[in-house]
Amino acid sequence: MRPLRGCRRRGAIVGTVTLCLAAGWALQTPGGVSLIVPQPNINATVAQNILLSVEYSCRGIATVEWKHVSSWGTTKIVEWKSGSYINISTGYKDRVTTFDNGSIQLLNVGMTDAGYYFITVTEEYGTNAYGTIILNVYEIIYEDLHFVAVLFAFLAAVSAILICFMWLCNKSLYLFQKKTHKLTASTTEEIELETIEC
């Protein structure tokens, strides 16, 4: 007996469809991590609290790890597994707050906190997602405030001197007018007396 040609063709189509469904199922099974970094560049001043904001999603349980890379070297900040454990390095013990979405908050940043912050989200099935945030930290420049304070003090001193000078001028003018008025009154009196005596 000879196989029918139409059945062989249908078998190939069914096999192809089955293979595609299996591949789709394999891609749909747990696995795959997505990570969004909404603000990849952050500017801050010394002693400010900053939020390194991210948002991740995955089908399984994820492990989140943050590292700081700068000219001083690489430092592991924190690592945690959702609902399980949190390991914060000793240098950041009182300065880091973790959030369920993968974000962290750094409290009281300093100049040494400037640099690159790398986040790695690893799903329990082995897939990873990576993100980077650049943090720029600036010092508050007190020289400008010092200049403004000195300028303000100088202008206040000049104003006080001018007010004193105006007060002296006013007093002098008042005394001069009073003396002139006395002279005019006494001169008029003398003239009247002279006319009466004559």
Image (cartoon, rainbow, N blue to C red):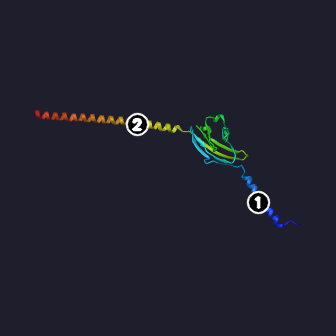
Badge 1 amino acid: Val
Looking at the rendering, in which quadrant would you find the C terminus? top left
CA separation in Å, label 2 and label 1: 92 Å
Q: Which mark is residue 17?
A: 1
Q: In which quarter of the image is residue 169?
A: top left
Q: Is residue 141 left or right of residue 61?
A: left
Q: Which mark is on residue 158?
A: 2
Would you call the spot at circle 2 few (<14 residues within 10 Å), some (14-19), or many (20 or more)? few
Residue 1, compared with residue 190, is above or below; it is: below
Q: Position of residue 26 (x, y in %)?
A: 74, 52
Label 1: state its secondary structure: helix
Q: Residue at x 23, y 35 (%)?
A: 180
Residue 47, by quadrant, is top right
Q: Is residue 82 left or right of residue 155?
A: right
Q: Position of residue 195 (x, y in %)?
A: 12, 35
- Residue 153 image point, x, y percent: 44, 36
Label disc, if present, on residue 176 of the rendered structure: none
What's the residue type where badge 2 is placed? Val
Give residue 158's position: percent from left, percent from top. Answer: 40, 36
Q: In which quarter of the image is the N terminus?
A: bottom right
